[in-house]
Amino acid sequence: MIIDLRSDTITKPTPKMLDAMMNAKVGDDVYKEDITVNELETRIADMFGMDEALFFPTGSMANQAALKLHTNPGEQVICDKYAHIYNYEGGGASFNSGISCKLIDGHRGMFTANQVEESINPPDFYHSPLTSLIEIENTTNKGGGACWDFEELKKIRKVADKHHLGYHLDGARLWNAMAVTGEDPKLYGGLFDTISVCLSKGLGCPIGSVLVGKKELMKGALRVRKILGGGMRQVGYLAAAGLYALDNHLDRLSEDHKKAKEIGDLLGTFSWIKKVEPIETNIVIFELNEKVNEDVFLSQLNEKGIRIIGMGSNKLRIVTHLDYTDTMHDRLFYELKQLKVL
Ligand SMILES: *Cc1c(COP(=O)(O)O)cnc(C)c1O
């Protein structure tokens, strides 16, 4: 048995999801004639109370399109030092939009409205890049699946309004945040100018993200997606997976969260672990004792069929997901307790 906990992206479509995909009605989406894609876009736009939505192959492309829609070359986006757009999108912000990132030294990928205010370059000081966008991530990936306090997000909106800045939410795991807080997606739609959400993370789709946004901003979205190479044809087969996931896989996210907490509690009992970061959703980040060699530890797990990833500086990450079964959970506990690490 392989227990793959590297990411919630490793899931495979369930038989029922595959059925839904096989039975999808499709058309050419570049002509906007794919009724299943159109249905998915309308559904997600309505969920968030947003004007428009657009289907993308990846979350990175949806974020990159948003950066382009909000900025001009030479400008600057404010984000956390842990931000996915800064760390994990291949330098796309500079490559695609010609912008730089002003990094906030936040806590677990989150920051305060005051920190944003301090990071804005004065617009008349032409020596520094013009600040044009604030970018938030919820839940935070590198921050360990932490959920933002909505009151802070509202304060940051006020800062954005005061300085005429755009406000983008990378909501790749926003479903996980909303599963914990019970927040209505419309709250987010009412606060942000654009939001990207992912269908291939916790929801179990093979591919797909959606960018929702206000009409004025989304005007250019089709063109930007085309430029990035994301104009796709009969992708209703993939959008059908998204519709299926919204109906069937949203409500079960709390199971992933419960398992993640249980793993965290167990890890906390081992002497070879220095620290387990707080667990709010489906991500567990923990730090090994100085005496433990990360590579040796990872290969020990590998021998037992357990896969997790290293994040550098003796920190490791476990992510629970749809394909991580109760049986695997029991087996993981058994193997971890048996492990001779020190
Ligand atoms: C996974 C992820 C994305 C998008 O990833 P893709 O692999 O391009 O779909 C964006 N933001 C965050 C925070 C993520 O975790």
Image (cartoon, grey):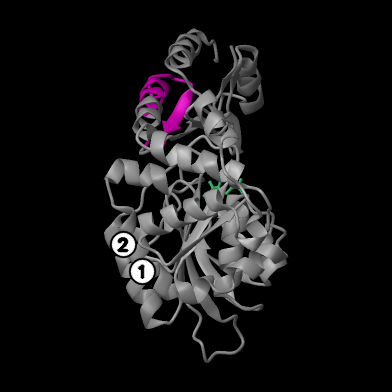
Where is residue 42 drawn, in percent x and y?
Answer: 45, 57
Q: Which residues are magenta?
A: 261-279
Q: Relative to residue 339, is residue 268 depicted above or below?
A: below
Residue 29 image point, x, y percent: 63, 56
Residue at position x 59%, y 38% from top? 313
Question: Does residue 206 sit above or below 228 in this rendering?
Answer: above
Q: CA distance from mark 2 to mark 1?
A: 6 Å
Left or right side of 186 for 12: right
Q: Check contact, mark 2 vs mark 1: CB within 8 A.
A: yes
Q: Which residue was labeled with disc 1? A: 156
> Looking at numbered disc 1 in the image, what kind of residue is underneath it?
Ile
Which mark, by number, is residue 234? none
Identity of the residue drawn at 58% across and 28% down: 12
Looking at the rendered image, the quarter that the C terminus falls into is top right
Q: Position of residue 90 (x, y in %)?
A: 69, 54
Task: Using a 10 Å C-alpha cutoff, classify the residue at mark 2 as few (fewer than 14 neighbours), some (14 to 19) or many (20 or more).
Answer: some
- Indicate the secondary structure of the residue bearing disc 1: helix
Residue at 54% over, 24% down: 15
Horizontally, is 43 left or right of 317 in the view? left
Neighbour class for label 1 at 10 Å: few (<14), some, many (≥20)? many
Could you tell me which secondary element the residue under label 2 belongs to?
helix
Quadrant in which residue 100 is drawn: bottom right
Residue 184 visible somewhere in the drawing:
yes
State the residue in front, 18 or 121.
Answer: 18
Q: Residue at x 58, y 75 (%)?
A: 71
Amino acid found under the numbered disc labelled 2: Glu
| Residue labelled with disc 2 | 152
Q: Is residue 277 magenta?
A: yes
324 falls in the magenta region = no
In front here: 163 or 129? 163
Residue 116 x %, y %: 42, 70
